[in-house]
Each structure stands twice: as structure tokens, then as C-alpha cells.
Amino acid sequence: MIDKRVRKDSFNRKFGKKGGFFVQFTTTFSLIIIGLIIGIIFGSLLFYFNIYIKARRGTVILENYINQDSKVASEILKNKGFKVIVIGGEGKVIKMDPPPNTRVKIRSEVKLFTESIKTVTMELPDFKYAWYKTVQTILREVNIIPSVRYVPASEFYGTVISTSPTPKSQVKSWDSITLFVSSGSSSISNQSNQNEGINQEGINQEESSTSSTPIEIIPPSVDVKNYEEVQQSTEPNSGNTSQPIQIQPDQNNQSSTESTENGIGTEGGQF
């Protein structure tokens, strides 16, 4: 039989100290990592909780002041730190902006609408394809608050595409209406694509016409009348033609030459 205790003792003698140090190092390192993770989680939770508390402290629930005197309501809101705007003069409050029972920030703006303001209830007309600035002017005349939202569409820039609420809906003064207005980006891209297609078709047609038909060289035209006038001006006149000069020898010279010729002939005959 083999004694296992000998092997165990020899292993402990060789690796006992090193193995204990490695185990101790790994345990301490893992504990440090776990502590760091717990600290990060706890710190982040504390940070977000602090922000939440500050946000809750900086906001309050807006009380309902409808059917109360505008002076009393404005004084209470100003004492709480709000900026109050009374629209319509003195009287009972019929509407608030923001609406009551909503959480708002301190020092924010609160509008109080009194009963003496002009209130209109109407059916919202269809403003499609109308200029958005004209629609804004019409709505503001009846104390309706318009807001613009641009949408890419094929219509021209600035034209109203649709509204929210939809046409034929009942609206009244101090309601807010959203106008969806064309930004014109889609129409510009479509038009550029059409122009590119037209230009490409024209180029193809020109190439086909030049390849199928031979090239004709047309000489420049000459003005016949001018050419005849120039030719007539260059030709000499028949009346002014110069006669050739005839040189006539003198009779004395002619007789002397004849005598010399005759003398030469006679002498030759003598020889």
C-alpha cells in the first residue's frame, strides 16, 4: 500500500505558502471589486434621489382659482412666487393657463383669463392650402392660440396641410390649435428629379438625332447684287480704253538702212 500522507506532506511543504497567498489575494481583490460596485450603485441612487427631492421642492401643484376674483387670485399667486398675467381686466377668472391641479415650477408664468374678455365659440373652418400667416391672423382675432408645426410635403412652402383639431370641430377663444404647414422639402426633391429626367430625355433625343442624320455643311450666302456691283466697278470703261501706241520710224533712217542693205547685197554679188 502507498502512504498518501507522505505525498500530502510533501505537497504542503512545496506549495502551502504560495497557495495561501494566492487565495488571500483573490479574496481581497474580489471584496474590493464588490465594495466598489456597491458604492457606485449607492452613490447613483443617492444622486438621483437628491435630484428628485430638489425637483419636488422646486415645483408645486397649481391650485384652482376659476370663478374667483382676479385680484385675489393674482395676489395669492404672486406671494407664492409666480409671474401672473391677467387677461381681460378685472372680474372672475374663467380660465387658467396652465390649467389647475397641474405641477408647475415656481416662478413660472400663470395666465388668468377673466369673464370680460371676448369669448367666441365657432366651428373650425377648413384652412387647407391657405397661407399659414393669414390663418394665424384670423385665429388671433378671435383669441385662439395657433401653433405651427412644419411637415415635409409636396405642397408649396407655407401652405396649411391640416389642423388639429380637425375642421368642423367646435372651438372657442383661448383654445390652442396646431397648424401643420408644408416645409416644401418634398416638392423640391420631386421637382429636381423631374428636371433631371427631362434633361436626360433631351440629351438622349439629341444624341439619337445626331447619330441618325448626317451632318450638312451649309456654305455662307453671297449677296449677288453687291458682287455684281463690285465686278462692274473693277472692269475698265469702254470709252476710256487706251489705244496701243504705234511707233513709226523716220523716213531718212529707213532710206539709209535700205541703201546699206542694197550695198551689202551688191557686194556680196560681186564676190
Image (cartoon, rainbow, N blue to C red):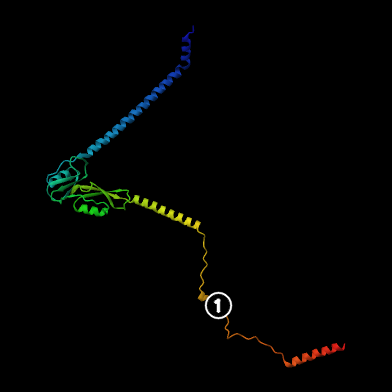
How many circles with numbers are drawn on the protein?
1
The amino acid type of the residue labelled 1 equals: Gln
Using the rendered view, name the quadrant where residue 33 is placed: top left
Where disc 1 sits, the SS reads helix
Relative height, residue 66 to residue 135 (above, below):
above
Q: Which residue lies furthest to the right in this view?
A: 271
Q: Which residue is drawn at 56% across and 79% down?
A: 234
Where does the image place residue 41, in percent across and percent down from the top left? 32, 30
Of 253 and 24, nearer the camera is 253
Using the rendered view, name the quadrant where residue 238 is placed: bottom right
Q: Which residue lies furthest to the top in this view?
A: 1
Q: Which residue is drawn at 33% across and 31% down?
A: 40
Q: How many residues crowd mark 1 within 10 Å: few (<14), some (14–19), many (20+)?
A: few
Where does the image place residue 141, in percent across and percent down from the top left? 19, 54
Judge left or right: residue 88 versus residue 50. Answer: left
Judge left or right: residue 96 versus residue 261. Answer: left
Where does the image place residue 172, in percent across and percent down from the top left? 17, 48
Q: Is residue 37 visible?
A: yes
Where does the image place residue 151, in percent across and percent down from the top left? 31, 48
Q: Is residue 74 visible?
A: no
Q: Which residue lies furthest to the bottom in this view?
A: 252
Judge left or right: residue 114 versus residue 242. Answer: left
Instruction: Give the residue at mark 1.
Output: 231
Q: In which quarter of the image is the C terminus?
A: bottom right
